[in-house]
Image: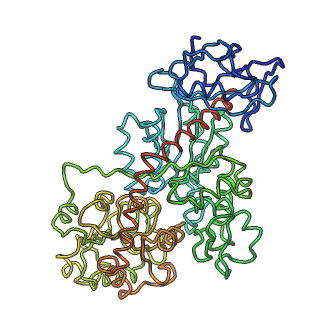
Amino acid sequence: MGVNYTNGPYVFLSKTKTKREKITVNGFTINSSRCKFKIDTIGFRGLGFSNVHLGEIMNDNCGKKNRDGKTIMKERNVMEYDIFTKFRTPLENALIISVHLSFVSMSPKKLHAAILCSPGVGHLVPVLLLGRRLINHHNLHVTVLAVTTTTSTAESQLLNSLTADIHLPVIQIPAADISSIVSPDAKVVTKICAMMRETIPTIRTTISSMDPLPDILIGDIFSTESWTIAEEIGMAKYVFITSNAWFTGLVTYSPVLDKEVVGQYVDQTEPFKIPDCKPVRPEDVVDPMLDRDDEDYRVYLNLAVGVTLADGILINTWENLEPQSLHALRNNEILRSIVKNKPVYTVGPITKNYEPVGVKSEVIEWLDKQPERSVIYVSFGSGGTLSAEQITELAWGLELSQQRFVWVVRPPAGHIKDGSFFESGHSGELNGQADYLPEGFLNRTKKKGFVVHSWAPQVEILNHVSVLGFMTHCGWNSTLESISSGVAMIAWALYAEQRMNATMLTEELKVAVRPEVLPTKKVVGREEVEKMVRCLIDGEEGKAMTEKVKRLKESAEEALSGTICFQYESFMKNLILNTICKSKT
């Protein structure tokens, strides 16, 4: 049989006495006319089981004779046959076989994935890395659509450094002006969602003008209002959760909590139960849940609904890191019904690779001169900010600890914890010095400390032999980078889902220490800062955390070489099935 899979890798097998023109597979109705080939001559050992012939193919019995004297054949370049349905009766022998092709050797039409990203460096980095992984390991054609603001220097620099990469086209879409519809005092989630909503016409025009048109739309959690574009064009749609599975469980279950919980979440005395997941304490809920009367909360509930409307969910985690939450999302009847039985795939850890550069930065040159495993790295992410009082206490705590440190410091922002979210990368340097640091601090600590006023090569720092610990805001990207580097943490949660992340790191994974009171509730004093730093550097608890995080690092490496491959293969099969079904409707 001369096979040409350009129009879709699906074959309709029929050896029936009762003619069937269509078959329902995994909720999709596929007409035989949609399939490239109908094959009527395959012989089976028995009429009752479809998997016998498939088993012979998979057992490399191609070319041999079966009991009926038929030659068992396998199409060239076909790597796998998957059974989506079994014969129900001997007279109803029909099935769909998903054929996973060797795309490189066959050179068919590649599937084209558009990945839509909302503003923010923390959203952009994992999207770009996911795009590269889909290109390099799954041979998809990928275009990243990055909705950007003009205020984020780091975001612009990151995009500019990648636009020359011909293998990962990046289209920058300026975020719509929302100044007339959203208050300047609105929360970050409200602003991002308003930007994405108002930018939909431009996104639609951009996607519609692509040649070839995308087959798949992958969007982050703030992009789900763009599902309408996917439905108009006939694209499969997948949501990419750039955080963890526990967070995904809370988000999807939040509409239920909204009906069940009376009053403010933060005023409750008992943790919120998510079916089969670890409960979430009231003080750990995500930022939009802190005030149910705020617009941010209503916007957040809409995001939860958007997640459930996707054809599948991709999460930046791995199986051994969150087995309980992943099992709940996939198997708990309540959660499954909420997400409408959509598949959940782990695609992580998605982090930047450590690649030493030829020219070392000043901070790396300083680290080269420090003893092994002696330095605490302090950074609160691309958007995190501290109050002036907290910066002062943190500075004194680092100085009192008498330990070596690298500190990425930004100007104070009052009581706003995400004050740099739309301004990532702006320098905090005034006339060569940061005037918000304690007087004389830089001079007194110049032998043991290195202060960075803007951007720092975080992955390179975390992988440096002199670095032992990481004081972090617990953003999920930074968390994964620290785990993948084998570095224990001081969990200093600030905003978004970071309090949940801090709880996971300290209580479940036991690879971090945290302040006794949340930094969002009160200023962490210098004595406590000193205590946490010393604990990580010198304490027995710190040594135990370091050993645990090393094991997690190994688990992450195993995931990249093992289970993640299976998850991506499963995702690709589901993606192809969705693509074929939607493109033929």
Of 59 and 564, the residue lying toward us? 59
Q: Residue at x 20, y 76 (%)?
A: 448
* Residue 395 x, y percent position in the rendering: 31, 80
Rendered position, 416 above or below 39: below
Q: Quadrant of the C terminus?
A: top right
Q: Residue at x 35, y 69 (%)?
A: 546
Q: Residue at x 44, y 58 (%)?
A: 477
Rendered position, 559 above or below 456: above
Of 444 and 488, the residue lying toward us? 488
Label tally:
0
**For residue 37, side relative to residue 199 (left or right):** right
| Residue 212 in view in this figure | no
Q: Quadrant of the N terminus?
A: top right
Q: Residue at x 64, y 49 (%)?
A: 225
* Residue 113 x, y percent position in the rendering: 53, 36
Rendered position, 13 above or below 248: above
* Residue 195 x, y percent position in the rendering: 57, 53
Instruction: Specify how the rendered protein is coloured.
Output: rainbow
* Residue 505 x, y percent position in the rendering: 47, 69
